[in-house]
Image (tube, rainbow, N blue to C red):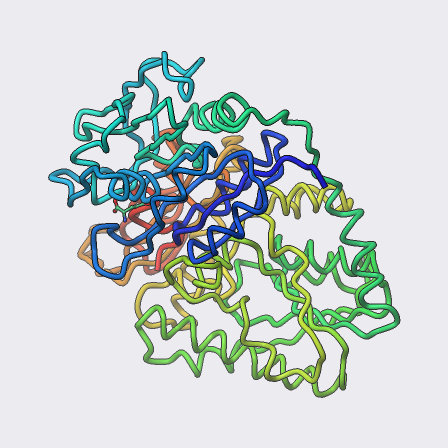
């Protein structure tokens, strides 16, 4: 097969899959390999170019992921990103050290537009930075082609050898001209034709699932969220009545959500998926009593989910396959994606397997990002309202309540969140904000209402813009809208006397507030 290939070498960065995705968007086929892969194997694939990803380590430390000099001597163009850029410089004789000033988030970068990498890019362009180390000295033969106020080497090149190093992350969409830079590399520098096309995901998946499952029985855990809904409808389309979906209402759902899910997926709805609803609120609240640590809450909610699911599965009996709506960012954040560091545990990755009598797990959305899942959902004919529903974590409001979870606190955050969502929709902002929700801080403070002293909770409002959910920043909601939300929450929700708006971006924060 003489398909053009770009190889991405994974050093454990959070955005490794994004790099591959951007390359595919340039219509160039691309595969990811661990940095441990034998160089001879990579050479044998005859790639048109190689991209080295970012990574959490410091490349000058003992035992940090590395590569050999030969990688840069094969005559194949190489682009290093962040860790990859630092490593390239270090291996070829440059210097990398802890930076005097760390850079996080959107930073203005001054680029030399004569560089092939920055051809057609504005001389001053906003890029996404996330680094503690920096290139203190370029390797021999390299010239600096970009810098920022705090970072003397934001990009460097050795044109003769076709080697390029970028300190920032062009693969992240916050780098405004990042796609242009990556396309300059794969099309301009590597000389790829850009004529590869991705096939239809839904069509291929339905076909592949039918072939794989045959006449087998399939069980799916449905949460009502976008991911598991798309997974369930995909399966329903592929195998119809062979599918059973179990929906556990853990009492940590958004206001009225359990009933809404039942209305769409239950027997009255348009889909064939043998829907079973389990009301398990009380079980969850008693297990969570007195627990304050977020990771522990996630574990308890995950484990209880498994117990409830197990009981239902026993009633159904042995099945052939178990479906999970895992999507790519879950895989990365759980530390299962190659070399990435564990950020937090996800209850929708793993867990269930031990409690169900089944042969194999199916994760049909495992390689997709959220926006791709939504595209697939629309392709499947799922109503827009559901496809563009706000993402909601598996552990639900359990992790949007800081400190102990109680029925009272659940009601407070449900009501506050419902008001927030209502006002965002009224202001016409519901489609333009990536994700927004209310959380309940564990802070109580003194206020005055109706001339009386109050000592109540503070609600935190979160709203972020993100395209791929790997990075995010606080949405700029008009102040009047925030004020309306604030006064409605304080007037209508008992137990709240303050409302905060969270300005933190990701990184260093996460999208959730736990
Ligand atoms: N760990 C390296 C640093 O802090 C690289 C970071 C990255 O690749 N995002 O500079």
Instruction: Give the image location of residue 311, x and y in percent.
Output: 65, 86
Instruction: Give the image location of residue 417, x and y in percent.
Output: 45, 51
Closest to the observer: 411 or 403? 403
Image point (44%, 83%), residue name:
286
Whether residue 335 can be seen here: yes
Image point (62%, 61%), residue name:
325
| Left or right, residue 272 beside residue 168 | right
Instruction: Give the image location of residue 86, x and y in percent.
Output: 28, 41
Whether residue 480 can be seen here: no
State the residue lying farthest toward the left.
100
Report the number of discs.
0
Q: Which quarter of the image is occupied by the C terminus?
A: bottom left
Closest to the observer: 77 or 114? 77
Closest to the observer: 356 or 147? 147
Q: Which quarter of the image is occupied by the N terminus?
A: top right
Q: State whether residue 221 is above or below residue 194.
A: below
Closest to the observer: 193 or 333? 193
Image point (16%, 35%), residue name:
136
Instruction: Give the image location of residue 278, x and y in percent.
Output: 65, 76
Image point (62%, 38%), residue name:
29
């Amino acid at each position: 097969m003489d398909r053009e290939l770009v190889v991405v070498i994974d050093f454990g960065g959070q955005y490794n899959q994004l790099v591959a995705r951007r390359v595919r968007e340039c219509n160039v086929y691309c595969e990811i390999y661990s940095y441990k892969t034998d160089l001879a194997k990579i050479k044998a694939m005859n790639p048109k170019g190689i991209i080295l990803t970012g990574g959490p380590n410091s490349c000058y430390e003992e035992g940090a992921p590395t590569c050999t000099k030969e990688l840069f001597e094969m005559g194949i163009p190489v682009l290093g990103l962040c860790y990859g850029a630092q490593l390239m410089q270090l291996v070829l004789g440059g210097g990398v050290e802890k930076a005097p000033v760390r850079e996080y988030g959107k930073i203005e970068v001054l680029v030399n537009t004569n560089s092939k990498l920055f051809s057609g890019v504005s001389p001053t362009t906003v890029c996404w930075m996330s680094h503690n180390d920096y290139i203190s000295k370029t390797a021999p033969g390299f010239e600096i082609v970009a810098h920022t106020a705090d970072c003397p080497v934001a990009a460097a090149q050795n044109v003769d050898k076709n080697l390029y190093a970028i300190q920032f992350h062009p693969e992240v969409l916050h780098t405004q001209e990042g796609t242009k830079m990556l396309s300059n590399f794969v099309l301009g520098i590597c000389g790829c034709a850009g004529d590869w096309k991705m096939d239809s995901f839904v069509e291929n998946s339905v076909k592949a699932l039918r072939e794989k499952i045959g006449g087998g029985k399939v069980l799916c855990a449905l949460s009502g969220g976008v991911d598991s809904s798309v997974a369930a409808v995909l399966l329903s389309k592929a195998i119809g009545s062979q599918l059973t979906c179990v929906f556990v209402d853990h009492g940590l759902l958004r206001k009225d959500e359990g009933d809404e899910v039942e209305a769409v997926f239950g027997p009255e709805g348009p889909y064939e998926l043998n829907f079973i609803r389990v009301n398990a609120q009380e079980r969850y609240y008693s297990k969570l009593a007195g627990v304050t640590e977020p990771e522990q809450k996630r574990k308890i909610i995950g484990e209880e989910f498994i117990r409830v699911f197990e009981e239902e599965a026993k009633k159904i009996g042995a099945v052939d396959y178990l479906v999970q709506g895992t999507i790519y960012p879950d895989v990365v954040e759980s530390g299962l994606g190659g070399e990435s560091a564990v950020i937090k545990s996800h209850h929708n990755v793993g867990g269930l397997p031990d409690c169900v009598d089944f042969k194999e797990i199916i994760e049909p959305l495992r390689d997709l990002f959220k926006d791709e899942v939504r595209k697939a959902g629309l392709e499947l004919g799922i109503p827009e309202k559901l496809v563009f529903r706000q993402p909601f974590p598996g552990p639900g409001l359990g992790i949007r309540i800081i400190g102990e979870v109680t029925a009272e606190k659940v009601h407070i955050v449900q009501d506050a969140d419902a008001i927030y969502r209502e006002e965002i929709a009224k202001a016409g902002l519901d489609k333009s904000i990536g994700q927004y929700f209310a959380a309940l801080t564990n802070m109580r403070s003194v206020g005055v209402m109706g001339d009386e002293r109050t000592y109540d909770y503070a609600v935190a409002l979160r709203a972020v813009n993100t395209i791929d959910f790997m990075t995010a920043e606080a949405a700029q909601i008009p102040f009047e809208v925030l004020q309306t939300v604030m006064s409605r929450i304080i007037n209508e929700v008992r137990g709240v006397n303050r409302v905060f708006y969270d300005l933190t971006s990701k990184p260093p924060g996460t999208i959730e507030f736990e």
